Image (spheres, rainbow, N blue to C red):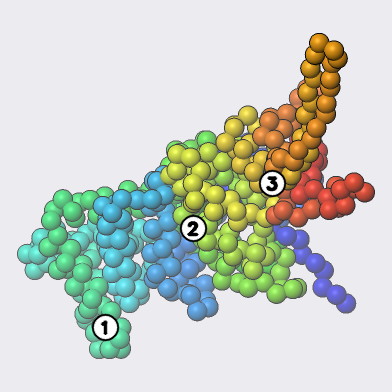
Amino acid sequence: MTKPVKPMGALILTVKSNETARFIEYARIIDRANDVRVFNAESGLSFDFLHYFWNSGGRAAGQIETIVEIFTDLMSVGKVYSQSSGERYFEQAVEELMRATLVVLSNAGEQISITAIHRVISSLPNEREQVDSEEWQKSSECSRIIAKLKARKEAFSPSQWADLDIAILHLLEKWPSLDSRTRSNIESTWSGLSSKFTYDPIRSMFSSGRVDWTPGEITHDGLIVIADISVLEFSRELARTCQILIKTVHQRAWLRHTYKPGCCNGAVIFEDEFAFLASRFDPHFHMVCRESAIAPVCISQNILSIAAEGFGEQMPGSNTLGFLGLFGTRFFLQNNETVTNQYASDLVGQEYQDVPGWNAGQGQQHSHFGVSANQQLKHLLEPIEFQRLARPDGENPLAEVICYNSGRSFNATKTPARPQGLPYLRVYFSR
C-alpha cells in the first residue's frame, strides 16, 4: 500500500484584521479546518523560539550564534537597511553582551529564554567596585549564576571553562568599565527589544518554555499556522516584531532541512502587505528556500513600499531589485504607481518592432503620399498597460493579471505568426 499523501502546510502572517477569519474559511471550504492552528493571545498556544532552537536536535542545536543572529534581525525591524557605523557598533556590542550571557546561562543549566537573558543583563554591575559588594552579590541574578558556575568549576572541561572565563570577564570587568553613556546606549538597545517579551501576553506566547508546534509539523504534517497578531490591530512595532520573529524562526528551521522527493510536502509562507513584514534575513532565505521545498508568496501594493520599509531606499536600488529578482513567478495587477509599472514593463522586456511612418505633400503640379517603416526597440507591454488592467467592481468579479515567469514563454501565447510565444500571459482571477 502506498502512503497517503499529506497536504501542503502553510505559515500565514497577518497584517489586516480580517485575514485570520478569511483563511479559516478557506480551510473550511477545502475540508482542512482540523489542520489550522491560530496563534494569538487567546489561543493558549506558545512558541518559545529560544527553547525550540536550543532543543531541536541536529548539528545546529544549542548554537549560540543562531540565537544571536535572530535577535540581530529583530533589532533591525523598523530601521533602515543600511546602518551607520555608530548604529552598527551598538548592534555588535549587544551581540557581544548576549553571547556572554548565553554562555553563562547555558553552562549553569538555566532555562534559555528571553526573560532569563533580560534578568541577567538587567542585574549587571555598573561599577567595578560593585562586583565585590555584598549587597550586589545578594541581589544580582548575574552574581547568583556566576557563583553557581564557580562552585562547580571542576565539572567543566578546559574548553568550557575557557569560554566561561571570557564570558565572565566581559560581564564583570569589561561591562562596568565602559563609559556610562556607552553602557546605557547598549543596554537600551537590548531592552528596547527584550522588554516587549517580558510582559504578558507576549511573555506567555514566546517565553513559556513550551513549543506547541514546530516548523517541521508544517512541512511534514500539513499543519496550517495563522499568526494572528495583526499589524493593523496591535501596536505597529510590537506586531511587526512578533510576526517577523515567527517568520525568521521558521525560515531558519526550514533551511536546515534539504528536501528529497517523498520526504515531505513542503510549505507555503504567505505574506500579504509584505513591506510591513520584510526582514534582513529575507534575501538569503528567498535565495535558497527552493532546496527546502518552501514556496514563499509575497504580496505588495508596489515596489516603492518594499524599497522603503524593507531596504531603506527612497527609490528601488540594488538591494530592492536584487531581492525582487529572486522571485521566479510574478503577478501584476492594476496599478497606478508609475515606478512599479515601469519596472513591470522593463521586466517583461523589449523587442525590435516595425514602426510605421507616413508622409504627404502638395506641390504645384501634383500631390504625393508615402508610407515607410523602421525598426525600433519597444516594450512588449508599455507601462500604461498596467494601469489599464481590469479590476473587480460591482459588476465584474474578475481581476485581470499579467503573469511573468522568469522570462519563459507561455504555450498559450504561441501562434503561427509568433511561434516563440510571449514571456507574459494575461489571465483573470476571481476576487
**355 up-or-down from 307: above or below:** above
Picture residue at 61% right of the left edge, 41% below the top: 343
Label 3 – label 2 distance at C-alpha = 30 Å
Residue 138 visible in rendering: no
Residue located beneath label 3 in the image = 349
Q: Outermost residue, top direction?
A: 364
> In terms of image quadrants, where is residue 170?
bottom left
Q: Nearer the viewer, residue 357 or 213?
A: 357
Q: Locate residue 420 relative to residue 333 in the image: left or right.
A: right
Question: Upstream in the sequence, badge 1 or badge 2?
Answer: 1
**Percent x, y of residue 387:** 69, 30
- Three-letter amino acid code of the residue under disc 2: Phe
Locate the N terminus and report the quarter of the image it occupies: bottom right
Disc 2 target residue:
281
Q: Residue at x 20, y 61 (%)?
A: 124
Residue 327 locus on image (x, y percent):
63, 54
Residue named by callout 1: 161
Mark 3 belongs to which amino acid? Gly
Task: Give the secondary structure at mark 3.
Answer: loop
- Of discs 3 and 2, which sits in the foreground? 3
